[in-house]
Image (spheres, coloured by chain):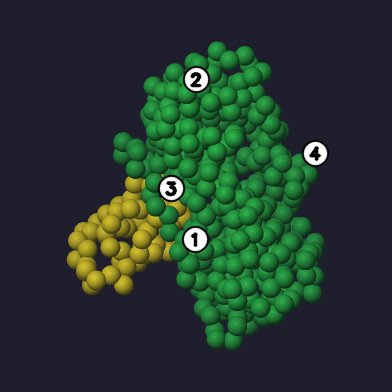
Chain colours: A yellow, B green
Amino acid sequence: MRRVTPDTIAVVDLGVCDRCGLCLPLCPPEAIHLELNILTVDEATCTGCEKCIAPCPVGALAMVAYAGR
Amino acid sequence: MPDVDVLVVGAGPAGAVAAWQAKQAAPELDVVLLERDRAVGAPVRCAEGVGDAGLREFANPDGADWVSRRITDVILEAPDDTQVVLADSGVGWILDRTRFDAFLAAQAAAEGAAVLVGAEATAMARNGNDRWHVRVKQRGIEDVYRARIVICADGVETMVGRWAGLDTRVPARDMESCAQYVLQGIDINPDAIYLQFGTAIAPGGYAWIFPKGVGVANVGLGLVALKTDGRNAREYLDAWIARRFPTGARTGYTVGGVIVHTTIKQTYTDGVLVAGDAAHMINPLSGGGINNAMKAGRLAGCTAAAAIREGDTSERRLAAYHQAWMDLLGEDHLKYYRLKQALEHMDDAFLNSLARTANKVAPQKRTLGRVLTHAMIRHPLLIPVVARFFV
């Protein structure tokens, strides 16, 4: 679990996402999961580092403002 | 709660060969091969190219129905489109991965492995008593498999290695973001593969044309996102195809990641072995992973069988798998990784000039070795790296 709540976190557009899974090993805190053909970014784990955004071959990930839980 | 000896997660080349070899080495063992998708080998998320020698260790391509095309030539293309036809490039094959993977799974089944499609591993935990408890969901129903050894062959997006506590993370500079179309109605030499380089085309990677037949090919590219101008891999591919094959019909597409990293530091732990893309065993220079996956699968299957027969599936016992991999391919893997890093220094102007120099060499002498030698002469930075391959 992270110590500091980030201002922005990554979210996935499931309409664009091809479920290739490229983003999973790129995520340092391992916040991204792929199960039953649905990709999710765990908002409680994402640190807002943005490492998953540019590498997505179809641009399915984006950063959004995050207010915390 | 089924008890199994070897549970293989992922029925791609690594997993299918692991299950096949484990059963062949120890027929008395219960071996289960899980495939998340509804069919082994589909969807195809691969450029489908393999070298002849590596392939033949596992299957005979001559007349096989899982071959799309036999390749006898390699054509490199510089950023300015200058073509360099290489000599002595050897034979390669463009496979039909759906048929090929099914063929390998059938081999495993013929030896007695149980193959389950539409069966996804969703969690895994060690339960004190020497077995991994793996939650598997199939057709909405969840079951727990208690396995002595889990072989993690679940690809780039691997979860099993993670659940086992292994580090499978990849730095951004070692991930090729790829996109590919099946293009029909294009004018290409159907017996050659084409590789084009260039920062405006595929920064940090290359674009490829892998023929599947006359007039039809897998056309794609891989790039490193850190080096792009902000566009994604599919956008780069669309731009390249608009220029090169504006009239080609796109009858299929795929996207995905190719990990061009050195093998993960630890491919094993108590009761777990990691093989193939999941273990970062793809050739870092070519991006080819199929042959390496099969070789690792064979090592994993054999190690698992032996360890179970000996009654010792501990981390210490399974370390032999990692050692066997390093002895077989680990050194070469590192060399290819260093060569990849060194080649990153070659800019477009250099590549264009290198292509022109290469074309001054007589066709029959224009081998890859000679091309790299010319590169070394003009770019001394490459010498210590390239020399290791040819000395």
State which mark lies toward you, 3 or 1.
1
Task: Specify the subunit that label 1 lies on.
Answer: B
The label nearer to you, 2 versus 4, is 2
Count residues near mark 1 (Cα–Cα under 10 Å), then give few for <14, some for 14-19, many for 20+.
Answer: few
Separation (CA) of disc 1 from disc 4: 39 Å
Horizontal side of residue B289 vs B383, given as left or right:
right
Give the residue displayed 51% in from the left and 71% down from the top.
B164
Q: Residue at x 47, y 39 (%)?
A: B340
**Do marks 2 and 3 both belong to one polypeptide chain?**
yes
Whether callout 1 and callout 2 share a subunit is answered yes
Residue type for callout 4: Gly
State how far apart marks 2 and 3 are (Cα): 26 Å
Residue carrying label 1:
B265
Q: Position of residue B289 (x, y in %)?
A: 59, 47
Q: Which residue in the protein does label 2 denote?
A: B355
Q: Secondary structure at mark 4?
A: loop
